[in-house]
Image (cartoon, rainbow, N blue to C red):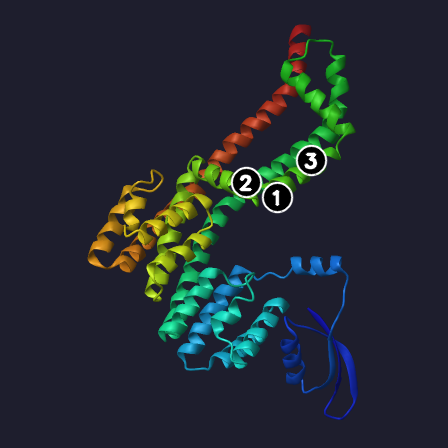
């Protein structure tokens, strides 16, 4: 939010301006730290449209949360007070929004609000999992340990997702470039060849006729292509955010060839890692399952965790649900069952998380190795089909003339 202020400097000079901060108290703190005596401070009124537009950019990168978590755990371990730790970290943060959030958190904690309660005000930055871990540390008196668990957890999650994204970026980029080149050929190159192909007088293959028809349509309605792609993208994005769309996309994701198996292992690793971290942090098993279900990121596995929570409430075990789920490998249910009988569920879950994280690492490495030749073959076939549709009629006429 933007605040307009009037203040006096140490020399008594009047200074007017604006300051960006998450709250009124955070804005006051920024001005005080700049050695200004505030005379008036009011929220800058803006149009509803501009206000909504600015909120779209109020996001915190996952990398910023990872770095913040590790820095906070380190400072807290060094016995630096929480408020001072938050202010120290805020100085180093580049994001203006995240900087204002950290300053607001420091103000809230300094004013007597618990750290976990202050975090709940910023759901865009801190997940329910994050808040629950901090709350557990505060209740049990082991906040330093909870912050250490959080820092390790956030780093593992970030590293895992970066590897998966890295494996998918290359094929997506290559496919996008190919589509762009194909569109440019249809709009600018094919119209020049269409007349030549029609003048040959020979019967054109069906593939050539389709190519000419597509080219003529795109030459006239070329603007419909980017508009259509944008419409499909925005429509798909909207639909995926609806409950039905989310359920459908999550189910289809798990059924994809090769990738479906990889995503399944990612979600198993995430469930095991989150549950293990929450249980080690002191949360009751039912609360840990509830939080894990919210942050797992896939509605299919979220429902699996919800069923587990209901079974635990009824006096049954988590493993009884996992053993019945066909998407989950038998080893998962068996190991959780061993952990429940031995009273070491958190350790067993941590072992499962490590195992499936390594499995995902191996799959990503293999996928990265295989994806290049696969793309070359697929794109080579597409280019061959495109070229043959143009050259075959010409070759046929030349052969007949000879």
Vertically, is 79 above or below 261? below
Query: Which residue is farthest front?
Result: 314
Residue underneath mark 3 = 228
* Distance from Cα at disc 3 to Cα at disc 1: 15 Å
Decide: marks 3, 2 in contact (CB < 8 A)? no
Residue 361 visible in rendering = no
User: In the image, what residue occupies the spot 75% across and 93% down?
Assistant: 11
Which residue is tagged 2?
245
Helix, strand or loop status at disc 1: helix
Residue 142 sits in quarter: bottom left
Of the two numbered discs 1 and 2 on the same chain, state the one appearing first in sequence.
Answer: 1
Q: Nearer the viewer, residue 60 or 366?
A: 60
Total residue callouts: 3
Do tag 1 and tag 2 residues touch (Cβ < 8 Å)?
Answer: yes
Q: State whether residue 285 is above or below residue 245.
A: below
**Sequence-wise, which precedes: disc 3 or disc 2?**
3
- The nearer-to-camera label among 3 and 2 is 2
Q: Above or below — where is 200 with respect to 329?
A: above
Q: Residue at x 55, y 31 (%)?
A: 379
């Amino acid at each position: 939010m933007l605040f307009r202020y009037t203040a006096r400097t140490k020399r008594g000079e009047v200074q007017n301006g604006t300051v960006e901060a998450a709250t009124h108290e955070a804005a006051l703190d920024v001005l005080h730290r700049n050695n200004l005596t505030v005379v008036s401070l009011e929220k800058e009124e803006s149009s509803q449209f501009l206000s909504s537009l600015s909120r779209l950019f109020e996001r915190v990168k996952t990398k910023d949360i990872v770095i913040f978590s590790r820095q906070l755990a380190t400072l807290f371990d060094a016995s630096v007070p929480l408020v001072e730790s938050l202010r120290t970290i805020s100085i180093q943060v580049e994001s203006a929004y995240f900087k204002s959030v950290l300053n607001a958190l420091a103000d809230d904690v300094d004013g007597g609000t618990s750290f976990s309660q202050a975090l709940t005000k910023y759901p865009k930055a801190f997940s329910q999992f994050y808040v629950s871990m901090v709350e557990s540390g505060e209740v049990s008196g082991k906040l330093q340990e909870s912050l250490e668990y959080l820092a390790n957890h956030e780093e593992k999650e970030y590293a895992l997702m970066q590897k998966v994204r890295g494996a998918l970026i290359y094929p997506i980029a290559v496919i996008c470039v190919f589509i762009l080149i194909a569109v440019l050929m249809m709009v600018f190159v094919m119209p020049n060849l269409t007349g030549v192909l029609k003048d040959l007088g020979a019967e054109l293959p069906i593939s050539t006729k389709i190519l000419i028809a597509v080219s003529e349509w795109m030459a006239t309605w070329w603007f419909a292509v980017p508009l259509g792609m944008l419409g499909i993208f925005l429509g798909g994005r909207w639909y995926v955010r609806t409950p039905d769309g989310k359920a459908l996309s999550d189910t289809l994701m798990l059924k994809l060839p090769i990738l479906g198996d990889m995503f399944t292992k990612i979600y198993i690793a995430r469930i095991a890692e989150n549950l293990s971290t929450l249980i080690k942090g002191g949360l009751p098993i039912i609360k840990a399952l509830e939080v894990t279900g919210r942050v797992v990121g896939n509605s299919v596995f979220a429902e699996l965790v919800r069923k587990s929570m209901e079974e635990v409430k009824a006096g049954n075990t988590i493993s009884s649900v996992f053993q019945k789920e066909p998407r989950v490998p038998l080893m998962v249910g068996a190991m959780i069952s061993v952990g429940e009988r031995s009273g070491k569920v958190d350790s067993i879950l941590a072992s499962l998380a490590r195992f499936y994280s390594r499995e995902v690492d191996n799959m990503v490495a293999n996928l990265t190795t295989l994806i290049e030749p696969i793309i070359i073959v697929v794109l080579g076939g597409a280019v061959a089909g495109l070229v043959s549709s143009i050259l075959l009629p010409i070759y046929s006429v030349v052969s007949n003339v000879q």
